[in-house]
């Protein structure tokens, strides 16, 4: 049995309850999220350990690798255990040189959904996020045509639920006029707090807010305040940063990535870390 609460669970629909502590599979690919991992057996072990710890929420995409990560997920976990929910993203492809190429035309988005289905070995995807903005923030353009294409596949039964990645509050509202949205995945962490209002809105509307780069991303979080709070609580700075996100709102969910079993266990253990009010107050000053 898992020894952690995983931050509790979040019910987003009758058929969609996820552990708030999830796992982001991006780092199972090679350097630059491109090509095969250095150690495929270790990648398989990480996924199986995540399930063993009670994680029921895995974030992935066919453009991780590309294809490599989804194939590893299938190899490690298929047939998938009951209650496991795989969240994937569409909206980009990879160049032969590893470059990230925007791919958001409706027919291409539909093709990407079918590719994810095939590589994961599924008949329907639990959640598909439309990757719309850039890594550092949302654009201002309309997403109606693109999101509408995914809504059509939802009507056909190939997608059960829809989400968004890299969007503004206005774009969330636009999408909701087309189909229900169960999750928003944006850049947010202790130091990047531009989405505070959207985090609160998602909590009010019972939308999962998944922070990508919860630990800072390509430039890990560095803060004397974070270091001092962690030392006081006998935790690592990374665990404190993850615990802060879980306590930030009732619908924040985490998808930290790692290719190490030991690091995975450390991340999952962060869900059991209760931050006292004075620590939260100190940490809140980092993003101000």
Image (spheres, rainbow, N blue to C red):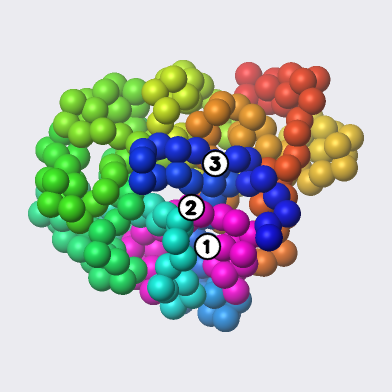
Mark 2: which secondary structure?
strand
CA distance separating discs 3 and 1? 24 Å
Q: Which mark is residue 9?
A: 3
Which quadrant holds the C terminus?
A: top right
The Cα atoms of the two marked residues, 2 and 3, are separated by 10 Å
Q: In the image, which is nearer the foreground, mark 2 or mark 3?
A: 3
Which residue is found at the position 12% from the left and 52% from the top? 156
Label ID, residue 57: 2
- At horizontal 26% and vertical 59% (from top left) the residue drawn is 124
For image coordinates 68% across by 22% down, the residue present is 284
Residue 95 seen from this side: no
Indicate which disc residue 239 carries: none
> Label 1 near label 2: C-beta < 8 Å?
no
Residue 50 coordinates in the image, percent (x, y): 59, 62
What is the x, y in percent for residue 26? 48, 60
- Can you tell which quarter of the image residue 181 is in? top left
Instruction: Pick whichever, 134 or 275, lies toward us.
Output: 275
Q: Secondary structure under badge 3?
A: strand
Measured in 3D between alpha carbons, the distance from the residue under mark 2 to the one under mark 1, in whole angstroms, is 16 Å
Provide residue 37's location: percent of width, then percent of height.
51, 75
Q: Secondary structure at mark 1?
A: helix
Q: Position of residue 211 (x, y in %)?
A: 50, 39
Which class describes the residues within 10 Å of circle 3: few (<14), some (14-19), or many (20+)?
some
Depth check: 52 or 184 in front? 52
Q: Which residue is mark 1?
A: 27
Q: Residue at x 47, y 24 (%)?
A: 203
| Magenta segment | 45-71
Circle nearer the N terminus (2, 3):
3
């Amino acid at each position: 049995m898992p020894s952690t609460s995983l931050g509790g669970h979040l019910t987003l629909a009758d058929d969609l309850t996820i552990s708030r502590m999830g796992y982001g599979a991006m780092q199972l690919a090679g350097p630059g999220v491109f090509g095969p991992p250095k150690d495929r057996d270790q990648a398989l072990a990480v996924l199986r350990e995540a399930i063993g710890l009670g994680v029921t929420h895995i974030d992935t995409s066919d453009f991780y690798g590309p294809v490599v990560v989804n194939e590893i997920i299938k190899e490690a976990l298929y047939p998938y255990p009951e209650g496991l929910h795989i969240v994937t993203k569409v909206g980009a492809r990879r160049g032969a040189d590893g470059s990230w190429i925007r791919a958001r035309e409706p027919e291409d988005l539909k093709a990407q959904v079918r590719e994810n289905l095939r590589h994961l070995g599924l008949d329907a995807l639990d959640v598909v996020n439309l990757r719309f903005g850039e890594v550092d923030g949302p654009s201002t353009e309309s997403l109606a045509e693109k999101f509408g294409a995914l809504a059509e596949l939802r009507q056909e039964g190939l997608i059960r639920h829809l989400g968004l990645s890299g969007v503004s509050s206005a774009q969330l509202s636009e999408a909701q006029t087309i189909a229900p949205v169960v999750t928003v995945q944006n850049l947010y962490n202790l130091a990047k707090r531009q989405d505070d209002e959207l985090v609160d809105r998602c909590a009010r509307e019972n939308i999962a807010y998944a922070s990508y780069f919860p630990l800072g991303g390509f430039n890990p979080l560095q803060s004397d305040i974070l270091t001092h709070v962690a030392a006081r609580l006998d935790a690592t700075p990374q665990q404190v940063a993850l615990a802060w996100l879980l306590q930030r709102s009732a619908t924040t969910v985490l998808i930290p990535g790692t290719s190490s079993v030991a690091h995975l266990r450390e991340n999952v253990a962060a869900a059991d870390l209760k931050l006292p009010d004075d620590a939260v107050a100190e940490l809140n000053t980092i993003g101000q």
